[in-house]
């Protein structure tokens, strides 16, 4: 009798990889008899996964497979976010292959068009959550097309139930990305031991501080000498604001600044793990930062009445600045003021992420095994 076949879909942006790959390694450990394959959309995905599988001694155990329309991008060698094959044609051509597997695990929404449009595939699909926090699109009808959803925390399960997802199809596993190598082993980026601040503006204009204040904040951080600075905006900001590349390039030579718009470190958790102070607006990266409570300052250039909404709850975890000229003083006092926010930060991280340990990936793997049965 052939062992069950499990397919992981690595078809979207590289930011999705850390939310899915830890389950591959955990599943290989939890169920040595399974036939595991990883479908990849580009040579960037293939290069990253092949390196990690080799390091984990799984190169012969887990098969890498190229999707129809696979893109070979030899110029991209550092884990850059690559262009992707046209999604819907690629999924249509992939459907026949997935009929021959017993479970399909994905982290991105687009792949869920397959079970939504082809109901006979639904029992195979398992959706792993990516990201965490209050700004997730929970009402997307594609979510209901997956037979099981793996979510980080009970709060997230409750919110999905509120929008109509049956409770029995939602499994709370913890924050899978917590066990990924970037968060677990942050790099040393600077020669000295000055505190490190990370500025991570969101990529969507209506949620971001970049368009109103971004250039001035970069100039301010470049001119000061008290803090080392990581300038690592959301991976997709450069798509919407291409001028960000020029702005960061103008200061990249400074020894106390580390700038990045392209490498895999943008999404693997490295910068959230390496920073001592978070400066941002509404990016969900702050949730990962708060896995280890540290000072935060939030930017509100539009002067949103954030206490009256449900999607800015993490702004209770630090000082909120609604005037640019107030920012230097807010940064200067952030470390001294941190004790007043610590309890809120711990409670928020627990509510949003659940168990933020490597065990989350193994819990997700066991949920996949249970679904196969």
Image (cartoon, helix red, strand yellow):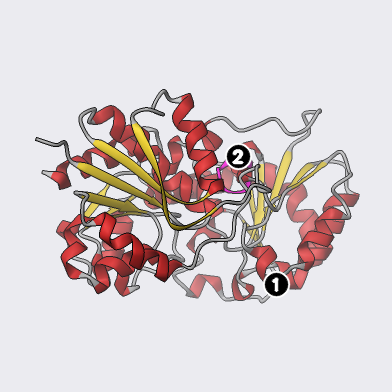
Asked if 155 appears above or below 354 in the picture, the reply is below
Q: How many marks?
A: 2
Q: Which residues are magenta?
A: 266-271
Is the residue 58 above or below the residue 259 in the image? above
Q: Where the N terminus falls, by quadrant?
A: top left
* Magenta-drawn stretch contains 205: no
SS at mark 1 in the image:
loop
Of the image marks 2 and 1, the number of the one nearer the N terminus: 2
Local SS, label 2: helix
Look at the picture and state if 328 lies above or below 45: below
> Of the numbered discs in the image, which one, if any, rests on residue 301?
1
Which sits in the foreground, 14 or 329?
14
Q: Toward the viewer: 353 or 37?
A: 37
Q: Decide: marks 2, 1 in contact (CB < 8 A)?
A: no
Q: Which residue is mark 2?
A: 270
Residue 292 visible in image:
no
What is the x, y in percent for residue 176?
39, 42
């Amino acid at each position: 009798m052939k062992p069950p076949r499990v397919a992981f879909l690595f078809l979207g942006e590289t930011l999705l990889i850390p939310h899915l790959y830890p389950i591959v390694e955990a599943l290989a450990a939890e169920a040595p008899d399974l036939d595991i394959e990883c479908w990849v959309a580009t040579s960037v995905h293939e290069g990253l996964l092949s390196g990690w599988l080799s390091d984990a001694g799984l190169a012969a155990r887990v098969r890498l497979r190229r999707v129809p329309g696979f893109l070979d991008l030899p110029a991209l060698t550092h884990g850059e976010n690559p262009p992707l094959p046209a999604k819907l044609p690629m999924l249509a051509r992939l459907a026949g292959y997935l009929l021959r597997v017993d479970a399909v695990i994905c982290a991105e929404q687009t792949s869920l068009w397959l079970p939504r449009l082809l109901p006979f595939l639904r029992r195979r699909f398992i959706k792993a959550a990516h990201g965490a926090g209050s700004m997730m699109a929970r009402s997307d009808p594609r979510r209901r097309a997956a037979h099981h959803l793996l979510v980080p925390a009970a709060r997230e399960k409750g919110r999905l139930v509120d929008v109509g997802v049956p409770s029995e199809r939602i499994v709370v596993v913890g924050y899978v990305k917590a066990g990924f190598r970037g968060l677990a082993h942050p790099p040393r980026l600077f020669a000295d031991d000055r505190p490190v601040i990370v500025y991570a503006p969101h990529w969507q204009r209506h949620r971001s501080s970049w368009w109103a204040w971004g250039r001035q904040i970069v100039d301010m951080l470049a001119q000061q000498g008290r803090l080392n600075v990581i300038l690592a905006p959301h991976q997709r900001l450069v798509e919407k604001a291409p001028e960000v590349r020029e702005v960061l390039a103008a200061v990249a030579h400074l020894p106390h600044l580390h700038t990045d718009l392209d490498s895999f470190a943008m999404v693997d958790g490295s910068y959230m793990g390496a920073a001592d102070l978070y400066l941002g607006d509404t990016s969900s990266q702050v949730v990962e930062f708060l896995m280890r409570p540290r000072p935060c300052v939030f930017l509100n250039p539009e002067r949103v009445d954030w206490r009256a909404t449900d999607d800015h709850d993490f702004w209770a975890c630090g000082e909120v600045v609604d005037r640019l000229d107030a920012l230097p003083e807010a940064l200067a006092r952030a470390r001294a003021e941190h004790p007043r926010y610590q309890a809120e930060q711990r409670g928020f991280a627990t509510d949003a992420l659940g168990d933020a340990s490597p065990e989350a990936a193994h819990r997700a793997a066991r949920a996949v095994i249970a679904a196969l049965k």
